[in-house]
Amino acid sequence: MKVLYSLNLLVLLCLLMLLGLNRVQAQDGEAAEAEPAAAGELTGREMAAQIPGMVDGAMIRVDIPSNDLEESREFYSEVFGWNITDNEETNGKILNWEDPAGNTGGITSFVAPGDGRGVVIYLFSDDIKESFKRINRAGGRSIDFTMEIEGGKATVGLFNDPQGNMLGLISPNG
């Protein structure tokens, strides 16, 4: 039941983002735009307080383990259109990525990938079947599992990247 609730909440958040409902609510209940950062030096805590949704526990970075950083670079840029750059501060041990929506993270060789069991990161997909085709062509493997959620309004599926990491896709239906 917890898994279904979490998936439903995730789908709702994805749909809200698609609809452009990314405005924050003011204390009086009216929608308000986030205020720009004040001029001058701010602490990290002060900067975070000015970003809507930046609260304890919010996901702000995802690091994906890899034994072969270049293979991972090619896979994620080809399949999902991620912009992947070298992280100059880590002597070639981390690549930085940015997805088309501006989310960021890293691909790291500091931690070896597991056997595909670990945290599953769900990515939005316009068309889950087409995404699975691209995944398989690029050296990943779609897992024979999909499930409709939200009364058939969306489909969830799983795949492994070339390093064996398990990830998920959520795709709207209709």
Image (cartoon, grey):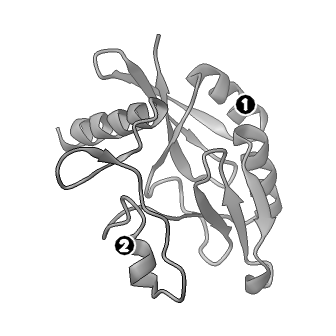
Residue 89: quadrant of the picture: bottom right
Image location of residue 142, percent across then percent down: 59, 33
Q: Which mark is residue 123?
A: none
Query: Mark 1: which secondary structure?
Result: helix
Image mark count: 2
Tell us which disc is closer to us: 2 or 1.
Answer: 2
* CA neighbours of label 2 inside 10 A, class few (<14), some (14 to 19), many (20+): few
Image location of residue 12, percent across then percent down: 33, 34
Amino acid under disc 2? Ala
In the rendered image, the residue lying farthest to the front is 39
4 relative to 90 in the view: left or right? left
Query: Mark 2: which secondary structure?
Result: helix
Mark 2 vs 1, N-terminal side: 2
Of residues 40 and 152, the one nearer the viewer is 40
Residue at horizontal 41 percent and vertical 31 percent from the top: 15
Image location of residue 13, percent across then percent down: 36, 39
Residue 17: quadrant of the picture: top left
The residue to which callout 2 is attached is 49
The residue to which callout 1 is attached is 134
Residue at horizontal 54 percent and vertical 86 percent from the top: 40
Of residues 137 and 61, the one nearer the viewer is 61
